[in-house]
Structures are given as C-alpha cells and as structure tokens.
Amino acid sequence: MSTNDDLLELQQLLARYAVNMTKNDVEGVVAVFTPDGTYSAFGDEFGLDQFPELVAAAPKGLFMTGLPLLEIDGDTGTGTQPLCFVHDATHDMRIGYYNDTYARTEAGWRIRTRKMTFIRRSGEHDSGIPHAFERSGA
C-alpha cells in the first residue's frame, strides 16, 4: 500500500522532469533518474550518458504532463503519465504517454525506466520512428 508522501514525492519528481525538459536543463533531467536509468523511444533505449546528446537533439518547447497513474509496491513502483508537448517555434503538438518504473533510492524516489508512446492522428500508439534520433558514433 502506498503512502500519500510517496505519491506526492513521485508527482514532484515527474514534475521536475517536465519542467527541466521545458527549460532544457540536462542536469536537472539526469537528476530525476537512477544511475542505471534509461529512456526509450524511437526503437532505442538511451542511458544517462547519452542524455546530454538526446536532450540537445529533442525539439524545444513545453512539456505539459498530466497527473500520473501510480502503483507503489514497497521501494519500487510503476506509472503512466500523459504528455502533451507543444513545439516552441510552431506550436505544433505531439501527444502520448510515458510508461515508467520507479525505485526508492537513498536520495528519494527516482525514475528507473521511462518509455515514450506517441499517439498518432491515425489513432495508432507507437514508440516513434526508429533511428529518428541519430547518435554520434552509432
């Protein structure tokens, strides 16, 4: 059974992710993940060492997230959080949701894995076009 303190801490953690992405604060984004944390989209999984490059390549704009649906089991948890991203230059939107796993660490709750699912105009739900993000040296 989860406590209200755990729920509030996780909600604030996820808010820090969205605000830091909006502000293009790579260090702030990295800080919400466990040291072995990963982000998955575009058919690939990215580790924390790749976050600076990944965030730099991401479109800039507003990361507007909704309240997450959270399930906590002791020191781990899972969640789904809706996202509406609005591009700063065009105001075009991308919508979808994150599927997450969480871990309680000595520093508090952190995201262990975050997987993006986009919702297309066709109604399809997918993780993005493979290789839409090109890693240097890949």
Image (cartoon, rainbow, N blue to C red):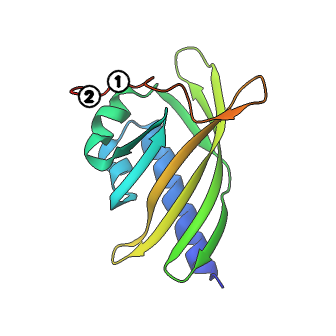
Q: Nearer the viewer, residue 16 or 122?
A: 122
Quarter of the rendering occupied by the C terminus: top left
Q: Secondary structure at mark 2?
A: loop
Q: Secondary structure at mark 1?
A: loop
Q: Is residue 66 left or right of residue 49?
A: right
Q: Residue 91 in the image: state x and y as whole percent.
A: 61, 19
Question: For the residues marked 2 and 1, what is the alpha-carbon distance in whole angstroms?
Answer: 7 Å
Q: Is residue 73 left or right of residue 44?
A: right
Q: Is residue 52 above or below residue 137?
A: below
Q: Dot 2: within a 10 Å radius of its alpha carbon, few (fewer than 14), some, or many (20 or more) residues?
A: few
Which numbered circle lies on residue 138?
Answer: 2
Numbered circles on residues, count? 2
Q: Is residue 9 above or below residue 23?
A: below
Residue at the (34%, 51%) spot, across then down: 30
Residue type (three-letter) at the residue carrying disc 2:
Ala
Q: Nearer the viewer, residue 14 or 134?
A: 134
Q: Dot 1: within a 10 Å radius of its alpha carbon, few (fewer than 14), some, or many (20 or more) residues?
A: few
Q: Is residue 5 left or right of residue 119?
A: left
Residue type (three-letter) at the residue carrying disc 1:
Glu
Residue at the (43%, 25%) spot, across then down: 131
Quick one: which residue is furthest to the top in this view?
A: 90
Q: Residue 41 in the image: state x and y as whole percent.
A: 49, 37
Which of the 4 image quadrants contains residue 7?
Answer: bottom right
Quick one: which residue is furthest to the right in this view?
A: 123
Residue at the (52%, 70%) spot, across then down: 9
CB under 8 Å between discs 2 and 1 = yes
Which of the 4 image quadrants contains residue 79?
Answer: bottom right
Question: In the rendered image, which residue does mark 1 sit on?
Answer: 134
